Image (cartoon, rainbow, N blue to C red):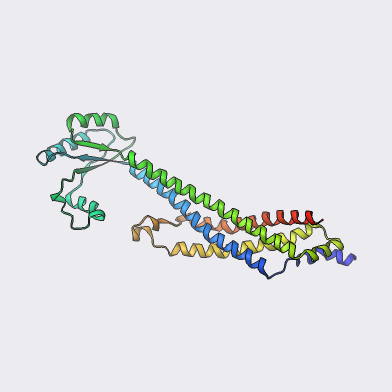
Amino acid sequence: MGGLLGRDAGASGRVVPPTGATAGLVVATAASMAFLAVFALALALATGRLAERWSEGLAQSLTIRISAQADKLDEQTRTLMEILRTTPGLGEAKALTDDEMQALLQPWFGPDMPVDALPIPRLVEVPIIGRGPDIDGLELRLEGEAPDAVLDDHTDWRRPLVNAAHRLRLLGWLSLLLIGATAAGMITLAAQASLAANGQVIRVLRLIGAKDITIANAFVRRFTRRAALGAAGGTLAGVLAIAALPRMDVAGSFLTGLGFTGWGWLWPLLIPVLAALIGFVATRRAAIRRLAEAA
């Protein structure tokens, strides 16, 4: 009996079968959830960068639209340029040429759009310097000296875009939480099934003096290791899939901006660690509760 008691730790380590449905379930669940977690993490980080880019980029410039009649357009433009040149907080203004206007409208109307034949207003781009100009004072001056000029500081349409990006980032983090909760639930079910399947072995271990905590630790070690290995494989597959996406500067599309940049590629390394932690907590709680009920 003493020898058996001395070997209870090694015996308990073989309580969970090395193969079987529960083993495959834990590994497959961890791998699948880790793969999805990589994309949810990439979505959260990419939308965060997008919100910052929209917020900072659009806040550094103004756009002024001149909708004057053709015989007054050049005069209004010269007046506007003089106003902008003498306004503190503004850089050098630039009026868009017909070629630039055609390039701006090409995604919507095609390359053959006759810009000169359409009543398209003249656009002037103005960079902001330092704290920027007095917007209210600038609007009053434009109203008095260039009444056909309309100032747009991008606030009206910048705010919804930034809010949308922030909500997408929140959705990414929420998806990570749901993925973690789903993984915890599946691992808990697998641990409970394994405990039920090994009920006879657990009763024998108790008869020879093995403590419940020793038996529980056997399940915790096995399921934690399976969760970590499965998550590592899923994370690797997810990172490779993200790396295979076309770069944003090549494809010119928002969706291709989904991915990691710089030190952000290290974030996925946390996924197997978190998967192991989830497996540890879920299995330990399930094992202790099950053993307490069977006592």
Residue 149 on image: x %, y %: 20, 36
Count of labels shown? 0
Quadrant into which the N terminus falls: bottom right
160 relative position to 238: left or right: left
Q: Which residue occupies the extreme left position in the image?
A: 71
Front-most of residues 82 and 45: 45
Q: Which corner quadrant of the image does residue 72 belong to?
A: top left
Q: Is residue 120 left or right of residue 180?
A: left
The x and y percentages for residue 70 are 11, 42
Q: Is residue 200 above or below residue 93?
A: below
Which residue appears farthest toward the bottom when viewing the image? 19
Quadrant of the frame with the C terminus: bottom right
For the point 71% across and 64% down, the residue is 194
92 over 225 or under it: above or below? above
User: Which residue is the extreme one toward the right?
Assistant: 1
Residue shown at the point (37%, 58%) measured from the top left: 248
- The image position of residue 158, as x and y in percent, is 35, 42
Kindly identify the residue that appears in the image at 56 percent across and 62 percent down.
32
The image shows residue 139, relative to residue 286, as above or below, that is above
Above or below for 126 versus 39 = above
Image position, residue 145 (x, y; %): 17, 30
Q: In the rendered view, does 245 fall on the left or right side of 7?
A: left
